[in-house]
Image (cartoon, grey):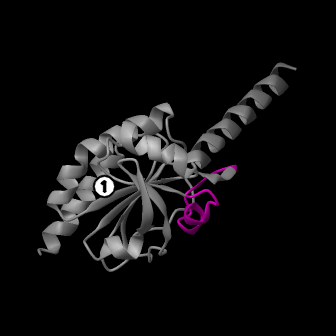
Amino acid sequence: MKKTFLSMSLAAAISAGFAMYSLTAAATLKPGDPAPPFTTEASLGGKTYTYSLADELKKGPVVLYFYPAAFTKGCTIEAHEFADAVDEYKKYGATVIGVSHDNIDTLTKFSVSECRSKFPVAADADSKVIGAYDAGMPMHSSMANRVSYVIAPDGKIIYEYTSLSPEKHVENTLKAVKEWAQTHKQ
């Protein structure tokens, strides 16, 4: 009986470990992969407009980050960190956009209060962009996992980072943008 309980406990611990691993080990796109083009409704500073990745890439690199849901603790922290870093990204010619499964009305509020009107957030109500970027949450693929990409102006992904923790997304993507800028002086 004691051995069976221990075996069951060990099996449960291993299973839980794999479940936690799968939350962060999604089949995301990798550096060198082409970034799927998309056009979607977005909001910046409370104003909605049509966002086109192709148009933004004409200006320079794009930091595209996916997040689970507006106004949740981790997503609010992440939005604040991206807002604080927008001017630094701009120094290297990069722009930032956040994408979630939220509706545009929610994101219009989020763009002002949490993104501080510094960068746009896009609505992906049908999860097509989330799906194209393999950024779905395991076990709930219509909701975005916390995934950040840096996309070069040629449309290729140059950096990918996946972690449910909001920490390191800004730090890591900014480092990737700086490294790209060093080899692509304008």
In the image, residue 131 lies at what x, y percent? Answer: 60, 64
User: Could you say which quadrant of the image residue 61 lies in?
Assistant: bottom left
Which segment did they paint magenta? Answer: 124-139
Which residue bears the numbered disc 1?
Answer: 173
Residue under the image location 55 percent in, 65 percent down = 129
| Front residue of this view, candidates 95 and 159 | 95
Is 134 positioned to the left or the right of 155 in the image?
Answer: right
Where's the N terminus, which quadrant?
A: top right
Count of marks overlaid on the render: 1
Q: Is residue 113 left or right of residue 99?
A: left
Residue lying farthest to the right in this orientation: 1
Query: In the shown orientation, is residue 91 left or right of residue 130?
Result: left
**Secondary element at image label 1:** helix
Percent x, y of residue 122: 47, 56
* Number of other residues with Cα within 10 Å of mark 1, as a class: few under 14, some 14 to 19, many 20 or more: many
Mark yes or no: residue 128 visible: yes
Residue 161 position in % (x across, y down): 41, 55
Farthest residue in the front direction? 47
**x 32%, y 80%: residue:** 154
Quadrant showing the C terminus: bottom left
Nearer to me, 133 or 21: 133
Q: Residue at x 45, y 66 (%)?
A: 50
Residue type of the residue flagged with mark 1? Thr
- Residue 133 belongs to the span the image colors magenta: yes
Does the magenta segment cover residue 15? no
Residue 19 higher or lower than 61, as above or below: above
Identity of the residue furthest to the top in this view: 2
Nearer to us in this view, 69 or 3: 69
Q: Is residue 114 visible?
A: no
Location of residue 28 in the rendering, given as x and y in whole percent from the top left corner = 52, 62
Q: Is residue 90 above or below residue 54?
A: above
